[in-house]
């Protein structure tokens, strides 16, 4: 299913550049383009160099929430907005009004348009995160020759994903940097380690698996492959690479001993995500509601102002638990470091 045991993860929000995906692919990895947050038009532009290179690559999409916020979550969102106004004011930013019946194409992450694009102009692989694509969408993509991958964080989610007819699964552990792929409520922390989680999912479903979350070196990758994964998916390990589009502030923070831990927080987007613990995480994790993507839009101007001001204490510094092993330099060197030892 995956042409390499090393997969470079899709990282939406600017980190995945076409250069990163192409350089990783040339170095022998399988790589994803990041479709999340982009309009169909922007995705088309992002994919052009990969299509032109004739590469075997994947495209990742966020599955949008299709239910309104609960009354409780909407109330918590309003309280959180008030809390953010003070923090935004310090940065000279304003916090937008987000009504609970928020209807904006961005709230569905341009889902229909992007699916239409990928059916009209097919790509080798499409992966989904934050939820399950409907079985009809999975079948339609497969009908165009696309292999379809779902992201899961537990055995229950793996079984549900298999029901939709996907070709493979990304099994993501809570050690992962960035957003959790979890979509079933009460899925809990799952297995204590990625190796155990992969072994559990391996025993429950017959699909090819890629393991992800907290893999910092070849030894960790080997253990995940030995547990039954066909490949490992790396995110944080390539965040500091030359081709990564992550902000300089983010790359520098990952290498700065001033940051000594990561935590899972909803403070930035309303969806659990692992980041370096900074002032914003400490100050706002407790008050942040379960409201993605509403919180993502609330904090957007604040994060932009923080970036412009060089204030990394208010930025979402996504990082997996193995962040201290993330190296700088060309991504080809990082990939070679893994492939040479597998
Ligand atoms: C900066 C960043 C952005 C990410 N964006 C996405 C994304 O757009 N789609 C996705 O499926 N996963 C995304 N992830 C999660 C990765 O797919 C993967 O599960 C994770 O990076 C693995 O853990 P690691 O970071 O410890 O290697 C992101 C991770 C990071 C660090």
Image (cartoon, rainbow, N blue to C red):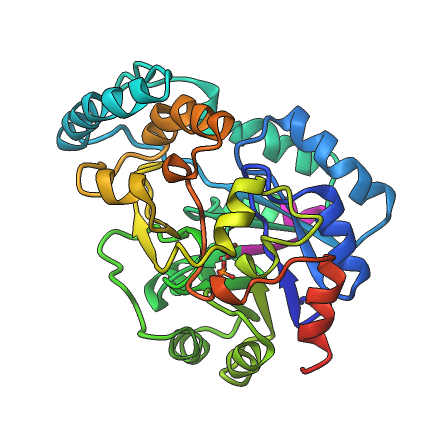
Q: Quadrant of residue 289?
A: top left
Q: Residue at x 36, y 27 (%)?
A: 299
Work out whether 272 lies above or below 342. Answer: above
Work out whether 62 lies above or below 299. Answer: below
Q: Is residue 212 visible?
A: no
| Magenta stretch contains residue 254 | no
Between 112 and 277, the one lying in front of the other is 277
In the rendered view of the protein, which quadrant contains the N terminus?
A: bottom right
Q: Residue at x 73, y 79 (%)?
A: 340
Work out whether 277 lies above or below 218. Answer: above
- Residue 97 image point, x, y percent: 30, 14
Q: How many marks?
A: 0
Q: Is residue 6 visible?
A: yes
- Residue 261 image point, x, y percent: 35, 59
Between 245 and 227, the one lying in front of the other is 245
- Residue 63 image point, x, y percent: 46, 40
| Magenta stretch contains residue 143 | yes
The magenta segment is: 141-149
Between 53 and 325, the one lying in front of the other is 325
Q: Quadrant of residue 333?
A: bottom right
Task: Return the residue found at the far bottom.
Answer: 226
In the rendered view of the protein, which quadrant contains the C terminus?
A: bottom right
Say left or right for 183 vs 148: left
- Residue 105 image point, x, y percent: 47, 20
Say left or right for 211 vs 279: right
């Amino acid at each position: 299913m995956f042409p390499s045991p090393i997969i470079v993860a899709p990282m939406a929000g600017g980190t995945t550049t076409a250069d990163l995906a192409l350089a990783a692919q040339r170095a022998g990895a399988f790589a994803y383009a990041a479709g999340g947050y982009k309009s169909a038009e922007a995705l088309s532009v992002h994919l052009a160099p990969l299509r032109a290179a004739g590469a075997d690559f994947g495209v990742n999409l966020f599955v949008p929430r299709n239910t309104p916020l609960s009354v409780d979550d909407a109330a918590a969102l309003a309280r959180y907005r008030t809390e953010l106004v003070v923090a935004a004011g310090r940065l000279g930013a304003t916090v937008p009004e987000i009504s609970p019946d928020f209807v904006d194409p961005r709230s569905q992450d341009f889902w229909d348009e992007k699916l239409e694009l990928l059916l009209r102009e097919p790509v080798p692989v499409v992966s989904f995160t934050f939820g399950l694509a409907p079985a009809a969408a999975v079948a339609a993509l497969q009908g165009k020759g696309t292999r379809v991958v779902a992201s899961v964080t537990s055995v229950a989610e793996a079984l549900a994903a298999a029901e939709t007819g996907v070709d493979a699964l990304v099994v993501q552990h809570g050690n992962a940097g960035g957003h959790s792929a979890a979509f079933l409520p009460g899925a809990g922390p799952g297995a204590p380690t990625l190796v155990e989680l992969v072994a559990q999912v391996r025993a429950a479903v017959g699909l090819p698996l890629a393991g992800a979350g907290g893999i910092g070196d070849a030894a960790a990758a080997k253990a995940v492959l030995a547990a039954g994964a066909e490949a490992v998916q790396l995110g944080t390990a390539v965040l500091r690479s030359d081709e990564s589009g992550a902000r300089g502030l983010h790359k520098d923070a990952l290498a700065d001993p001033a940051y000594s831990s990561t935590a899972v927080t909803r403070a930035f987007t309303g969806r659990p995500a692992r980041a370096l613990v900074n002032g914003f995480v400490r100050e706002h994790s407790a008050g942040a509601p379960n409201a993605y993507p509403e919180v993502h839009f609330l904090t957007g101007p604040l994060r932009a102002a923080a970036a412009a001001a060089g204030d990394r204490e208010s930025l979402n510094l996504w990082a997996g638990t193995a962040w201290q092993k993330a190296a700088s330099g060309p991504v080809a060197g990082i990939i070679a470091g893994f492939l040479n030892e597998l």
